Amino acid sequence: MAKRKEKLKPIHLKIKKGDIVEVIAGNDRGKRGKVLKVYPRVQKVIVESIKFMKKHTRATQTNPQGGIQTREAPIHISNLMLICPSCGYPARIGHHFLEDGTKVRVCRKCNEIVDK
Ligand SMILES: [Zn+2]
């Protein structure tokens, strides 16, 4: 029996802030964008200019016009695929340990290291 680890590890996501991803499901399928924000607990990310959410706002002092604002909505990472910066294709990501023990992400297509 494996012993339960005492420290809570941060939930590991294959997608990180700054990555270029492609949407692989839903209305925005095929679109690409940059990851702006990551929510590890819910495994969702905000992708630049994808999946706009319409938000109706009342006229306020800061926003005297009111009306409809559009914002990026979080997308679950299962609907996204990382674009490999080396080969430019949506890539399956593997992990690899460097000689100094650093864990890096590796594109399974071209075997290039995704992380700089
Ligand atoms: Zn690649």
Image: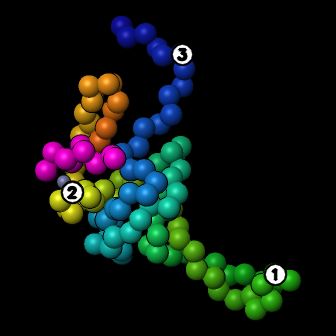
Q: Is residue 73 above or below residue 42?
A: below
Q: Is mark 3 within 8 Å of ligand 1?
A: no
Q: Nearer the viewer, residue 58 or 82?
A: 82
* Amino acid type, mark 3: Glu
Q: What residue does disc 1 label? A: 62
Residue 50 lies in quadrant: bottom left
Crowd tier of the residue under label 3, counting other residues whose Cα lies within 10 Å: few below 14, some 14–19, many 20 or above: few
- Left or right: 53 in relation to 63: left
Give the residues in magenta.
Answer: 106-116
Q: Residue at x 33, y 32 (%)?
A: 103
Magenta residues, dominant SS class: loop
Q: Secondary structure at mark 3?
A: loop
Give the spatial CA distance, label 3 vs label 1.
47 Å
From the image, tell me which residue sits under label 2: 86
Q: Nearer the viewer, residue 94 or 60?
A: 94
Q: Which residue is mark 3?
A: 6
Answer yes or no: is residue 79 visible.
Answer: no
Magenta stretch: includes residue 111: yes
- x, y (%) of residue 96? 25, 33
Disc 1 secondary structure class: loop
Mark 1 CB within 8 Å of ligand 1: no
